[in-house]
Amino acid sequence: MKDALQNQNGNALWFILLAVALLGFLAGAVSRNSSSVNQSGSIEQARIKASALLRYSKSVETAVQQMMLNGVSENDLDFIAISAAHDNTNCSDAQCEVFDIKGGGIQYRSVANILSDSSHSDIWHVSTENRVYQFGCDDANNGCTELLLLAKNIPKTVCLQINKIQSITNPSNDAPRQSEILEGSEFTGSYSATINSVSIGGTNTTNEAPQVKGKSAGCVYEFGSSQNIYHFYQVLVSR
Protein backbone atom coordinates (compact mmCIF):
# COMPACT_ATOMS: atom_id res chain seq x y z
CA MET A 1 0.00 0.00 0.00
CA LYS A 2 2.82 2.35 0.97
CA ASP A 3 4.64 1.57 -2.31
CA ALA A 4 1.44 2.30 -4.29
CA LEU A 5 1.04 5.70 -2.59
CA GLN A 6 4.69 6.52 -3.29
CA ASN A 7 4.21 5.58 -6.93
CA GLN A 8 1.11 7.79 -7.16
CA ASN A 9 2.95 10.70 -5.52
CA GLY A 10 5.85 10.20 -7.90
CA ASN A 11 3.53 10.19 -10.92
CA ALA A 12 1.76 13.34 -9.68
CA LEU A 13 5.09 15.11 -9.21
CA TRP A 14 6.16 14.10 -12.71
CA PHE A 15 2.96 15.52 -14.20
CA ILE A 16 3.41 18.76 -12.25
CA LEU A 17 6.98 19.14 -13.49
CA LEU A 18 5.85 18.40 -17.04
CA ALA A 19 3.10 21.03 -16.78
CA VAL A 20 5.56 23.60 -15.45
CA ALA A 21 7.96 22.85 -18.31
CA LEU A 22 5.16 23.16 -20.88
CA LEU A 23 4.01 26.47 -19.39
CA GLY A 24 7.58 27.78 -19.55
CA PHE A 25 7.88 26.71 -23.18
CA LEU A 26 4.57 28.33 -24.09
CA ALA A 27 5.49 31.55 -22.30
CA GLY A 28 8.80 31.71 -24.19
CA ALA A 29 7.07 31.05 -27.50
CA VAL A 30 4.48 33.76 -26.87
CA SER A 31 7.25 36.21 -25.89
CA ARG A 32 9.25 35.46 -29.05
CA ASN A 33 6.18 35.75 -31.25
CA SER A 34 5.20 39.03 -29.58
CA SER A 35 8.71 40.41 -30.13
CA SER A 36 8.64 39.30 -33.76
CA VAL A 37 5.22 40.88 -34.30
CA ASN A 38 6.37 44.16 -32.72
CA GLN A 39 9.49 44.20 -34.90
CA SER A 40 7.48 43.45 -38.03
CA GLY A 41 5.02 46.18 -37.10
CA SER A 42 7.82 48.74 -36.67
CA ILE A 43 9.33 47.84 -40.02
CA GLU A 44 5.93 48.09 -41.71
CA GLN A 45 5.31 51.52 -40.16
CA ALA A 46 8.72 52.71 -41.38
CA ARG A 47 7.94 51.39 -44.86
CA ILE A 48 4.60 53.22 -44.93
CA LYS A 49 6.33 56.49 -43.99
CA ALA A 50 9.08 55.89 -46.55
CA SER A 51 6.52 55.27 -49.28
CA ALA A 52 4.64 58.44 -48.34
CA LEU A 53 7.83 60.51 -48.45
CA LEU A 54 8.78 59.11 -51.86
CA ARG A 55 5.31 59.62 -53.32
CA TYR A 56 5.08 63.20 -52.14
CA SER A 57 8.56 64.24 -53.26
CA LYS A 58 7.91 62.63 -56.65
CA SER A 59 4.68 64.64 -56.94
CA VAL A 60 6.70 67.82 -56.34
CA GLU A 61 9.13 66.83 -59.10
CA THR A 62 6.25 66.07 -61.47
CA ALA A 63 4.63 69.43 -60.67
CA VAL A 64 7.88 71.31 -61.33
CA GLN A 65 8.45 69.51 -64.63
CA GLN A 66 4.86 70.13 -65.76
CA MET A 67 5.08 73.83 -64.87
CA MET A 68 8.23 74.21 -66.93
CA LEU A 69 6.60 72.40 -69.87
CA ASN A 70 3.74 74.89 -69.57
CA GLY A 71 6.13 77.80 -69.97
CA VAL A 72 7.07 78.71 -66.39
CA SER A 73 10.74 79.65 -66.27
CA GLU A 74 12.97 77.66 -63.97
CA ASN A 75 14.09 80.99 -62.51
CA ASP A 76 10.49 81.85 -61.60
CA LEU A 77 9.69 78.69 -59.63
CA ASP A 78 8.48 79.68 -56.17
CA PHE A 79 8.53 77.38 -53.11
CA ILE A 80 7.28 79.99 -50.64
CA ALA A 81 4.90 77.54 -48.93
CA ILE A 82 7.95 75.87 -47.35
CA SER A 83 9.08 79.08 -45.64
CA ALA A 84 9.29 82.82 -46.23
CA ALA A 85 13.00 82.38 -47.01
CA HIS A 86 12.00 80.42 -50.14
CA ASP A 87 10.05 83.38 -51.57
CA ASN A 88 11.09 84.01 -55.17
CA THR A 89 10.49 87.66 -56.09
CA ASN A 90 10.70 86.71 -59.79
CA CYS A 91 7.30 85.06 -59.33
CA SER A 92 4.54 87.63 -59.72
CA ASP A 93 1.44 85.41 -59.70
CA ALA A 94 0.20 82.03 -58.47
CA GLN A 95 1.01 80.29 -61.75
CA CYS A 96 4.67 80.02 -60.77
CA GLU A 97 4.01 78.87 -57.21
CA VAL A 98 4.68 75.15 -56.92
CA PHE A 99 2.34 74.66 -53.95
CA ASP A 100 -0.70 76.44 -55.37
CA ILE A 101 -3.70 75.10 -57.23
CA LYS A 102 -3.04 77.58 -60.06
CA GLY A 103 0.64 76.66 -60.24
CA GLY A 104 1.99 73.21 -59.45
CA GLY A 105 -1.44 72.10 -58.28
CA ILE A 106 -0.27 70.23 -55.19
CA GLN A 107 -0.96 70.91 -51.53
CA TYR A 108 2.01 71.67 -49.32
CA ARG A 109 2.82 69.03 -46.69
CA SER A 110 5.61 69.34 -44.17
CA VAL A 111 8.12 66.56 -43.52
CA ALA A 112 6.67 66.19 -40.00
CA ASN A 113 3.20 65.75 -41.46
CA ILE A 114 4.31 63.06 -43.90
CA LEU A 115 6.24 61.22 -41.19
CA SER A 116 3.32 61.60 -38.75
CA ASP A 117 5.86 62.92 -36.26
CA SER A 118 5.08 66.29 -34.67
CA SER A 119 8.52 66.31 -33.01
CA HIS A 120 10.30 66.43 -36.37
CA SER A 121 11.34 70.09 -36.63
CA ASP A 122 13.30 70.14 -39.91
CA ILE A 123 11.55 71.57 -42.97
CA TRP A 124 11.97 70.77 -46.65
CA HIS A 125 14.86 72.57 -48.29
CA VAL A 126 15.31 73.37 -51.98
CA SER A 127 19.05 73.25 -52.69
CA THR A 128 21.18 74.34 -55.65
CA GLU A 129 24.69 73.41 -54.47
CA ASN A 130 24.85 69.65 -55.09
CA ARG A 131 25.52 67.44 -58.10
CA VAL A 132 23.89 64.02 -58.47
CA TYR A 133 26.21 61.79 -60.45
CA GLN A 134 25.08 60.99 -64.02
CA PHE A 135 22.14 63.39 -63.89
CA GLY A 136 22.91 66.09 -66.41
CA CYS A 137 26.57 67.16 -66.50
CA ASP A 138 29.00 66.22 -63.74
CA ASP A 139 31.51 69.08 -63.93
CA ALA A 140 32.24 71.03 -60.76
CA ASN A 141 30.51 74.26 -61.78
CA ASN A 142 27.14 75.76 -60.95
CA GLY A 143 25.85 74.99 -64.41
CA CYS A 144 25.90 71.31 -63.42
CA THR A 145 24.33 71.47 -59.97
CA GLU A 146 20.83 70.03 -59.60
CA LEU A 147 17.72 71.58 -58.10
CA LEU A 148 17.15 69.24 -55.17
CA LEU A 149 14.39 68.78 -52.64
CA LEU A 150 16.05 67.80 -49.36
CA ALA A 151 14.81 66.52 -46.00
CA LYS A 152 17.36 66.00 -43.24
CA ASN A 153 17.27 64.12 -39.94
CA ILE A 154 15.11 61.37 -41.38
CA PRO A 155 14.81 58.41 -38.94
CA LYS A 156 17.24 55.62 -39.79
CA THR A 157 14.44 53.05 -40.06
CA VAL A 158 12.62 55.21 -42.61
CA CYS A 159 15.85 55.92 -44.48
CA LEU A 160 16.61 52.22 -44.88
CA GLN A 161 13.10 51.51 -46.12
CA ILE A 162 13.34 54.35 -48.67
CA ASN A 163 16.39 52.67 -50.12
CA LYS A 164 14.80 49.23 -50.14
CA ILE A 165 11.83 50.62 -52.08
CA GLN A 166 14.28 52.30 -54.49
CA SER A 167 16.37 49.12 -54.86
CA ILE A 168 19.35 50.89 -53.27
CA THR A 169 21.78 48.71 -51.32
CA ASN A 170 22.11 49.52 -47.61
CA PRO A 171 25.70 48.39 -46.84
CA SER A 172 26.12 46.68 -43.46
CA ASN A 173 22.46 47.44 -42.68
CA ASP A 174 23.08 51.17 -42.83
CA ALA A 175 22.46 53.83 -45.46
CA PRO A 176 25.13 54.63 -48.08
CA ARG A 177 27.70 57.07 -46.68
CA GLN A 178 27.96 60.60 -48.11
CA SER A 179 30.60 62.93 -46.69
CA GLU A 180 28.54 66.05 -47.31
CA ILE A 181 25.28 67.41 -48.68
CA LEU A 182 25.10 71.20 -48.86
CA GLU A 183 21.83 72.94 -48.12
CA GLY A 184 23.13 76.44 -48.72
CA SER A 185 20.79 79.35 -49.32
CA GLU A 186 17.18 78.60 -50.20
CA PHE A 187 16.41 78.60 -53.92
CA THR A 188 14.77 81.91 -54.86
CA GLY A 189 15.30 81.88 -58.60
CA SER A 190 19.07 81.58 -59.05
CA TYR A 191 21.74 78.96 -58.44
CA SER A 192 24.44 79.41 -55.82
CA ALA A 193 28.05 79.92 -56.83
CA THR A 194 29.01 77.44 -54.08
CA ILE A 195 29.43 73.88 -55.37
CA ASN A 196 29.70 70.69 -53.36
CA SER A 197 33.08 69.17 -54.16
CA VAL A 198 31.69 65.64 -53.81
CA SER A 199 28.88 64.25 -55.95
CA ILE A 200 25.91 62.33 -54.63
CA GLY A 201 26.20 58.79 -55.96
CA GLY A 202 29.67 59.36 -57.37
CA THR A 203 32.51 56.90 -57.83
CA ASN A 204 34.37 57.64 -54.59
CA THR A 205 33.42 54.69 -52.40
CA THR A 206 34.32 56.51 -49.18
CA ASN A 207 32.64 59.89 -49.66
CA GLU A 208 30.08 59.76 -52.47
CA ALA A 209 27.55 57.03 -51.62
CA PRO A 210 28.01 55.10 -54.90
CA GLN A 211 25.06 52.85 -54.02
CA VAL A 212 22.65 55.66 -55.05
CA LYS A 213 24.23 56.05 -58.49
CA GLY A 214 21.52 56.60 -61.08
CA LYS A 215 18.79 57.16 -58.48
CA SER A 216 16.80 60.39 -58.68
CA ALA A 217 15.71 59.88 -55.06
CA GLY A 218 17.33 58.14 -52.13
CA CYS A 219 18.57 58.40 -48.58
CA VAL A 220 22.19 58.66 -47.41
CA TYR A 221 24.05 58.87 -44.13
CA GLU A 222 25.76 62.25 -44.10
CA PHE A 223 28.85 61.94 -41.92
CA GLY A 224 30.78 65.10 -42.84
CA SER A 225 30.87 68.50 -41.12
CA SER A 226 29.79 66.98 -37.78
CA GLN A 227 26.38 66.18 -39.27
CA ASN A 228 25.96 62.42 -38.69
CA ILE A 229 22.37 62.46 -39.93
CA TYR A 230 20.21 60.67 -42.49
CA HIS A 231 19.47 62.86 -45.48
CA PHE A 232 16.75 62.26 -48.10
CA TYR A 233 17.05 63.83 -51.55
CA GLN A 234 14.83 64.10 -54.63
CA VAL A 235 16.01 65.57 -57.92
CA LEU A 236 13.54 68.20 -59.13
CA VAL A 237 15.57 69.52 -62.07
CA SER A 238 18.73 67.86 -63.38
CA ARG A 239 21.23 70.03 -65.24
Image (cartoon, grey):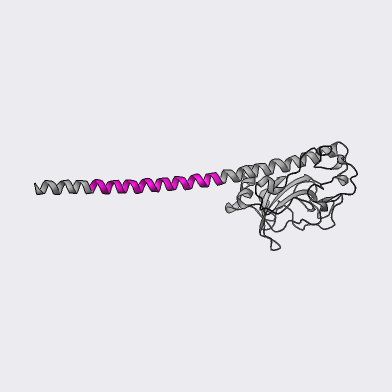
The structure residue drawn at horizontal position 45% and vertical position 45%, both measured from the top left corner, is 33
Left or right of residue 22: residue 77: right
Left or right of residue 15: residue 36: right
Tally the numbered discs: 0
- The percent coordinates of residue 154 (x first, y second) are 66, 52
Point out the stretch of residues depicted in magenta.
14-42
- The percent coordinates of residue 217 (x first, y second) are 71, 45
Q: Is 40 included in the stretch rendered in magenta?
A: yes
Left or right of residue 30: residue 174: right
The structure residue drawn at horizontal position 84% and vertical position 46%, both measured from the top left corner, is 78
Left or right of residue 125: residue 29: left
The structure residue drawn at horizontal position 74% and vertical position 39%, both measured from the top left corner, is 59
Q: Is 202 included in the stretch rendered in magenta?
A: no
The structure residue drawn at horizontal position 81% and vertical position 37%, both measured from the top left corner, is 101
Q: Residue furthest bottom?
A: 226
Observer-nearest of 219 and 211 = 219
**Magenta stretch mostly in which secondary structure?**
helix
Residue 178 visible in this rendered orientation of the protein = yes
Observer-nearest of 73 and 109 = 109
Observer-nearest of 239 and 189 = 189
- The percent coordinates of residue 150 (x first, y second) are 74, 50
Residue 167 visible in this rendered orientation of the protein = no
- The percent coordinates of residue 31 (x first, y second) are 43, 48
